[in-house]
């Protein structure tokens, strides 16, 4: 029996996805005479820029997540439902979900992006993505489990596999993750694992192009690479991954790195819902939208944020997949939807580029604000300030701040719980069991709702 | 192939379990000329008294857990291993674990306790235990999932099952848990679920004996019951559970409560390792120990904390299963082990009873310190102070303190992430899927290491 959620008298706007764009849009519709329905497969908003700190033991998962119901507290025209959207039926103006069918007048796709393995299924099966809270927690457990296993391994190759950490992709996430693992080695491992020969712990950052942080200035690129090298990260540019079987990573040029921890941050793709105009899907699995974020070939379906490609002459690939672009699109679309409902002219979206930044480690970050570029301690404090201010919720700001201050003075990381099942075998089988654990819990922890 | 961990020249003391007793013992052996090995199936110490706050969204899991390796930072005579002990072979002086076989001179069992379902397998299968971090996180997800499911249910019985929360067992854990759920209802649900008819949300506390908090004073018993009733908890004393099938709880007197959330805090049992003298196992699955915590029938095997029953005329069931008893036994045993190694006389253990306390909710707690008994606001602040001071680690103290202050002023709970898989069906099947989710993830989240 299918439950139906028919419309009332007011225009109904359905927003799929409670990321930066979705929540901005929903909040801007607060005092409007419309019915807003927000659908998300999680009951919380994820602050993705800090996922890497969850994965490396710096922050609690709860402090970078915020309950979506709490964000919309007191917003009387909004209904929130935890569900997964299965399909859009544009001709009938309905979306099919795991809990039933919803009618809409206007539909907004703000589903964001997911890891892009570019069709390499073996890599997808064995490498660790880091785009959601469960994935970040899973990665944290894997890193810590591998360190524990390395303590009892007698086999040298197995030890190398357990102690080599490889990050693929030299964008901000890759730079920040490899830097955070290097600091974990430097400040935490030497205390926590006194028996461990730290010289055997290696961190690799692999990037296909000639430089890191491709979207940033040359100063930022060079300085971030220098920072990473200071921290002991082996930076390999012009290096492309050929394959990864869970125990060894092979580069296109034939080099092999034994590793049971390969973190994939080499690309993202949009999360497109079935039923949308297939011709609208462009590079990176994004949907092509016009200047008011309306999807090509649809009358009343829009896309904002990472999943949307607003292609112009200056931006042949659309806007960057960053929070400010999603927030600005959400805000503009809220105004335009009200204009459309009131038969008023719409305003084309204008992107205000706030610049870019990335942190490598303690006192080491790079910031580009248009022509203003700086690196080092001040950049690091700027990075922390901007991220704290962008975090949703006062409690989260407070808890993250407390953690950062505490870490700054103690040189420690607070959260090192292994919370996924820990499979163990005899040392010969160590790696087998590691990967088993990995597969099993990824499947589980991925948190995909199952459809009956 | 079995790995072996043979002894060196120094006397080797193996401690199984990093709870309150185990870590106190290990720390007291810090400057002694012995080899200490601590084995635990987790890489962290759990502060069990606050698990109920994790389960009800008040605290992050990470803030009541502490990495065991960090506790023993710099303790050169200690080696820590994450593993599960499978068996003791007393005649050979070895323990068999999932990572190999360890020789010992002295073995200390500080494995603590687990939920006791008194052999009722149907209840064990369907009710939620709350003795570990994964169990508390699982319970938090279940409570929140049931609230989400209640939003889309059209069936009245299904709605009742989703919105009735039953806590079985009126000890401190049961009182604290039912109080915390009542406050969740009062302060959080009315904001988070504006469509929900709060009068349909019911919290039951079921206790077999005539009063709550059986081990405390009459004042504490009466006041805690009054506090719970003020918060809207239906307290049922003299009520015993007959059965629970996952959808309805049946009492011995025939009363039935429809509920898909039954939290089991009706009893604990010791976690006894295979291979110990079976005659030593007494009531509550504890092992009988003498006045220096040596297990009956063994020369060099000891037990401390929840798993140990030091039976005397005044204490026919041994000491209460509380942190101070475990800590004091750990401390005394450290001294006695050194005495034994040096052929000096041992000192019998003397328990210093620090009193008992339980919190019901904001400004509502009960404290018994021998003849000094008080209830209400001051008791509540006392309870918070004592728990903050007992928490391991400065960061944890700080984060818990920040959370409590923030909650006090905001009337909110910070952590409401659903992190286990969310199975959904059509409304007819809601309950089926709820239990399915429950079974599946309990299996998973229980975090039991598998043995190859």
Image (spheres, coloured by chain):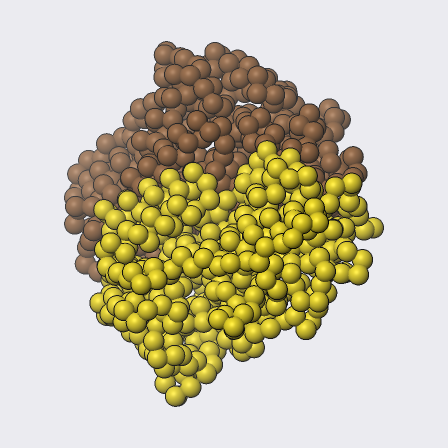
Chain colours: A yellow, B brown
Q: What residue is shown at x 37% (from left), y 57% (from top)?
A: A56
Q: What residue is shown at x 76% (from left), y 55% (from top)?
A: A94
Residue B122's place in the image compared with B103, above or below, is above
Residue B399's place in the image compared with B86, above or below, is above
Say left or right for B214 vs B422.
Answer: left
Q: What residue is shown at x 44% (from left), y 14% (from top)?
A: B375
Residue situated furthest bottom in the rendering: A253
Residue B312 coordinates in the image, percent (x, y): 38, 26
Q: Quadrant of residue A368?
A: bottom left
Say left or right for A291 vs B33.
Answer: right
* Quarter containing the N terminus of chain B: bottom left
Say left or right for A269 vs A241.
Answer: right
Closer to us: B384 or A147: B384
Residue A8's place in the image compared with A249, above or below, is above
Tally of numbered tags: 0
Closer to us: A114 or B109: A114
- Is residue B257 shown to the viewer in this render? yes
Residue B10 coordinates in the image, percent (x, y): 19, 55
Residue A285 coordinates in the image, percent (x, y): 59, 70
Q: What residue is shown at x 40% (from left), y 12% (from top)?
A: B373
Residue A374 coordinates in the image, percent (x, y): 26, 60
- Is residue A162 shown to the viewer in this render? no
Closer to us: B40 or B385: B385
Residue situated furthest right in the rendering: A1
Q: Quadrant of residue B242?
A: top right
Say left or right for B233 vs B250.
Answer: left
């Amino acid at each position: 029996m299918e439950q139906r959620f028919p419309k009332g008298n007011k225009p109904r706007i359905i927003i799929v996805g409670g990321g930066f764009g979705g929540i901005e849009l929903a909040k801007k519709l607060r005092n409007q005479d419309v019915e807003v329905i927000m659908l998300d497969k999680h009951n919380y908003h994820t602050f993705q820029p800090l996922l890497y700190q969850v994965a490396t033991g710096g922050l609690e998962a709860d402090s970078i997540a915020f309950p979506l119901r709490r964000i919309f507290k007191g917003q009387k025209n909004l209904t929130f439902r935890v569900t997964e959207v299965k399909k859009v039926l544009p001709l009938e103006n309905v979306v099919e979900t795991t809990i039933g069918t919803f009618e809409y007048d206007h539909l907004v796709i703000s589903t964001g992006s997911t890891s892009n393995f570019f069709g390499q299924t073996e890599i997808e099966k064995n490498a660790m993505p880091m785009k959601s809270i469960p994935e970040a927690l899973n990665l944290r457990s894997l890193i810590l489990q591998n360190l524990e296993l390395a303590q009892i391994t007698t086999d040298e190759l197995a030890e190398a596999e357990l102690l080599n950490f490889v990050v693929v992709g030299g964008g901000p996430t890759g730079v920040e993750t490899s830097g955070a693992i290097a600091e974990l080695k430097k400040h935490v491992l030497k205390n926590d694992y006194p028996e461990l020969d730290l010289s055997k712990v290696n961190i690799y950052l692999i990037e296909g192009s000639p430089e890191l942080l491709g979207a940033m200035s040359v100063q930022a690129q060079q300085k971030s690479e220098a920072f990473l090298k200071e921290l002991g990260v082996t930076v390999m540019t012009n290096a492309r991954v050929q394959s990864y079987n869970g125990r060894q990573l092979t580069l296109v040029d034939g080099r092999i790195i034994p590793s049971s921890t390969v973190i994939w941050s080499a690309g993202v793709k949009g999360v497109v819902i079935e039923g949308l105009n297939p011709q609208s899907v462009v590079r990176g699995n994004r949907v092509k939208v016009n200047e008011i974020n309306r999807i090509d070939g649809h009358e009343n379906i829009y896309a904002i944020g990472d999943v949307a490609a607003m292609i112009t002459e200056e931006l042949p690939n659309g806007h960057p997949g960053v929070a400010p672009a999603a927030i600005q699109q959400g805000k503009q679309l809220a105004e335009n939807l009200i204009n459309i409902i009131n038969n008023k002219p719409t305003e084309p979206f204008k992107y205000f580029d706030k610049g870019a930044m990335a942190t490598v480690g303690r006192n080491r970050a790079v910031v580009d604000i248009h022509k203003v570029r700086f690196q080092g301690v001040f950049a690091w404090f700027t990075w922390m300030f901007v991220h704290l201010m962008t975090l949703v919720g006062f409690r989260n700001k407070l808890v993250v701040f407390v953690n950062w201050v505490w870490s700054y003075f103690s040189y420690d990381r607070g959260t090192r719980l292994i919370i996924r099942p820990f499979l163990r075998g005899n040392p010969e089988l160590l790696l087998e069991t590691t990967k088993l654990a990995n597969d099993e819990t990824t499947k589980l922890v991925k948190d995909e709702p199952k459809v009956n």
